[in-house]
Amino acid sequence: MSITPQHRPRRVQERLVALIILALLLFCPPLLLVIDALPAAGLSWLPLYIFIAWATLIGLTAWLMEDGSKH
Amino acid sequence: MRTDPVILSVAFGYLALLFVVAAWGDRRAEQGRSLIGSPTVYALSIAVYCTAWTFYGSVGRAAEHGPSFLLIYLGPTLAMLMAPLLIRKMVRIAARQRITSIADFISARYGKSSSLGALVALFALVTITPYIALQLKAITVSHAVLVNYPDSADTSLVDEAFWMDKSFWVALVLAVFIILFGTRHLDASERHEGMVAAIALESLVKLIAFLAVGIFVVFVMFEGPGELFSQVAATPELAQAMSLESVPGGATGWVGMLLLAFLAFFTLPRQFQVLVVENVDEQHLKRASWLFPLYLLAINLFVIPIAMAGLLLGGLSGDPDSFVLTLPLSTGSEGLPLLVFIGGLSAATGMVIVETIALSTMVSNQLIMPLLLRSKRLHLGTKGELAGWLLGIRRVAIVLILLLGYLYHALIGDAYSLVTIGLVSFAGVAQFAPALLIGLYWRGATHQGATLGLIAGFMVWAYTLLIPGFVQSGWLDAGLINQGPWGIGWLRPYALFGLEGWDIYTHSLLWSLLANVGLLAGVSLFTRQTPLEQTQAALFTEAMNPNLQATSLWHGKTTQGELRELLSRYLGMPATRRVFAVSTNQTTTSLSPTLDDNEQPASTELITRAEQALAGSLGSASARVLINSVVRGEALDLESILSILDTTSQTLEYNRRLEQKSQELARIGEELRGANERLRELDRLKDEFVAMVSHELRTPLTSIRAFAEILRDGENLPDEKRRHFLGVIVHESQRLSRLIEEILDLARLESGRLTLNPQPLDLAHLARHSVDAIARLQENRGVTLKMQLEAEPAPIIGDPDRLEQVIINLLDNAGKFADDTAPEVLLRVYRHKKHYRLSVEDNGPGISEDERERVFEKFHQIQQHEEEKTRGRPKGSGLGLPISRGIVAQLGGRLWVENATSLDGASLIMELPEAPPKEPASSEKPIAT
């Protein structure tokens, strides 16, 4: 079936749920432990990783929300 | 520039600016040109989350505990990601039910319970007062640092009279601000537009101030981040400062803190106020869901550089909480520290303003009003408006809350660092989360469950965080923490039940939430909801259901006059007139209440609107008590609410079924189209069949007729010729009758009327018999016929006559298609698994893959007619194989074509199931087709 206007909000919602799961994965230990274990030249890579992941999530949310509001 | 008069005039000048902005915001709101009707302002107002704790404390926490400070902001980032799903629901409910605070929200969810509301308000007061104290402390300390630098900033409040403490005066100014802009309307669910505008401005100021320090430290004190971090890398003590190792509790502590910040973001009274109560338009949540996280990211960007710079420069003043101020001070800069001070001030005041409004609403609506309504003396004193009273209560509450915060700060504030107080408060308010969030999605959560869960969660919180805090302040014996109460080791507050090695907040959160959620769920499963609770639970959990409009709950009877008197007593005349205006506009044109109007019964819509208006001012629990006092009879029309909910779910169910049905119809239509297509094809085949049969019958008939005519006319024919012609006639007649026999067989097979006579028999024996029958004919044709009986006996169940017909047909066919010069045919009978197979191979050209199924079509041979003729072969009717396959299939077997294994040509294989051993013939199963 094609995406009718009725289906759009649901699609946005599904993407949002996927984004939340992604955020949980990015900010929780299994991945953090991997990043933390990387050999670092000075400070740990952890803060840099978090800031990048954080910014990416914000960008994705902005894209999803602002794109969705046009319709 | 760092003299007291300058600092004080700048600070109070800044506060004056807030007054101006707030007044402007309120003016614009009155004119209907709202300042805050923008998603950006909404997002900025949510940034009241970043308090003085963020402004000063983040750097301190980064210096001491590495990246753990980030969790305080990652939690809300996750929460805001869910805003379009979760907070939107809360906003919608709050708007519909005129919710004024988180206590009101929880109380409304659990049947407008005044006891639960009071409990939440009380707990909020206990947890948040220290947090307000923390803000005042931050103002005092930052002022002291600014004035005393480079001397130590240690200012003991005990030495100073309270009127010398700047934060006392700031608190006083804030009290005035909050009273002016926070209690303008009686209706607490109405927006405080001026206040929100001021808060948004404060959020901008603190962000700019913090970014300014960050840029100054990184680019002026150091030459860019490169130099700063290379210096850090060269300092071995700092190498591990930002790894997970420095986070208290490691990975567990990380998750715990993330969860803590996530939950607290929903349940902090000030966050609930700006997120839900002050929300103008739920569409704003979309922008806020990414703009607010972006704000958090921006304000945290320079925390690590500042912390590292402070540590590198040898811990300037010792206290990392003050790095934000001491770093620019150490360079002798004059203007920047003042800006930082203002930034910190804005962070602190913003929090104090919103938190105090939220708390005062809770205290007046959830704690004091229910008591007043219960006291008979006040209730019966019907004369005079209570509206003034209400505002008065709220104003007194504001002053008292600020005073309480100040006292806490003055008395025990010194013992705690900024972050500790903040996190203890976080863990405290997180106890509201189960009742709030579970109540939003689980209809079955009951009032008793929520109350008990809340109480248990709070007690565990107090035991594992609050009381040990007192110990650390030196108020209680340190033995409580080290040895446990009365020396009981497993009761140690920081290692309850022997759970050690966790950081104290995660530890406390685990046990308190376990008790809280456990009791909420457990008790709810075994208690019953009152009808009102059921309705409220349904209205909350189904809030996003589009069919659910605010429906009239009231079914009882009252007069308009009584209602008018009640409203005017509590809300004042103007508000009362507004409530009535809407309804009278719809029904009658007269606006002034006449005697007649007062005697008229009030409509259910009017009663509902009256309750909502009361709820907006007094909280839902009190509003219900008041409405109950004037409405007689069956007060709540619960049946209709529940039936509306049921109807909506029924409608949804119908929709779902309809959709299913239409899909089904579409599928059936498709099937019908397919069936029709097939019928047409069959029709075409039938026509073809009739044409072919006629053709087949005509050929022998023509020759019979021709020879018969010759015999009739040619009287002089020699005997020999005559005999020959007669022979031809006989042969053709035989062929004709065989053909008709076959056509009849086929018709019977296809209509399922072919009666078989199945019985146990030996396939090998049958094969031998058939070979004997056809051997002579094959011999005449010059075909070499071989036989390999690998399984003998081969017991099967079948009709011997019909099977013999099949075998002979196969052998006959094979003979026809075998090689021209040295035709060979091989018959094999062998066992395959639980079946017996009979294969007939020839050494002819074989049958190509795509022809293999087509040879079983009727008259297939006719297609090869021409070819057959050229090869000079006797042709068959083209019905033998289809009939054979039909017979075999009716006996439960299969017939198909493969490549021959021992000869070069095709192999036709018949497979029949093995007969069940020792079955008496009488119990034969009917043969399935």
Image (cartoon, coloured by chain):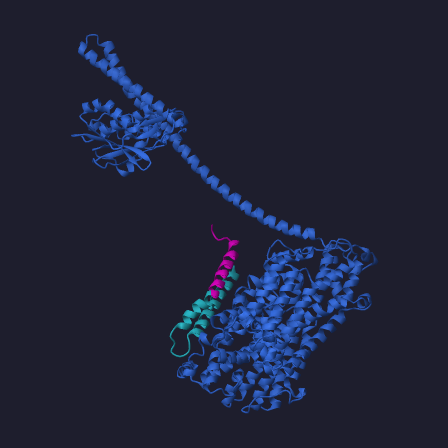
Chain colours: A cyan, B blue
Q: Quadrant of residue B531?
A: bottom right
Point out the image quarter for the N terminus of chain B: bottom right
Task: Using the image as rendered, state which of residue B516 and residue B84 is in the foreground.
Answer: B516
Q: Is residue B276 left or right of residue B66?
A: right
Q: Position of residue B552 (x, y in %)?
A: 70, 55
Task: Using the image as rendered, state which of residue B127 and residue B738 is in the foreground.
Answer: B127
Q: Which residue corresponds to the image point at 24% horizontal and 14% vertical from the top-left?
A: B707
Relative to B550, does residue B275 appear above or below in the rendering? below
Q: Which residue corresponds to the image point at 60% horizontal and 59% vertical from the top-left?
A: B522
Q: Position of residue A2 (x, y in %)?
A: 47, 51
Q: Residue furthest top?
A: B715
Q: Is residue B778 left or right of residue B122?
A: left
Q: Residue furthest right?
A: B595
Q: Is residue A42 left or right of residue B351?
A: left
Q: Position of residue B367 (x, y in %)?
A: 71, 69
Instruction: Name the main secondary structure of what is drawn in magenta.
Output: helix
Point out the image quarter for the C terminus of chain B: top left
Q: Which residue corresponds to the image point at 44% horizontal and 75% vertical from the top-left?
A: B243
Number of numbered labels in the structure image:
0
Say whether residue B534 is magenta. Answer: no
Say whether residue A10 is magenta. Answer: yes
Relative to B149, does residue B603 appear above or below in the rendering? above
> In the rendered structure, which segment of residues is drawn in magenta?
A1-24
Q: Which residue corresponds to the image point at 25% horizontal and 12% vertical from the top-left?
A: B709
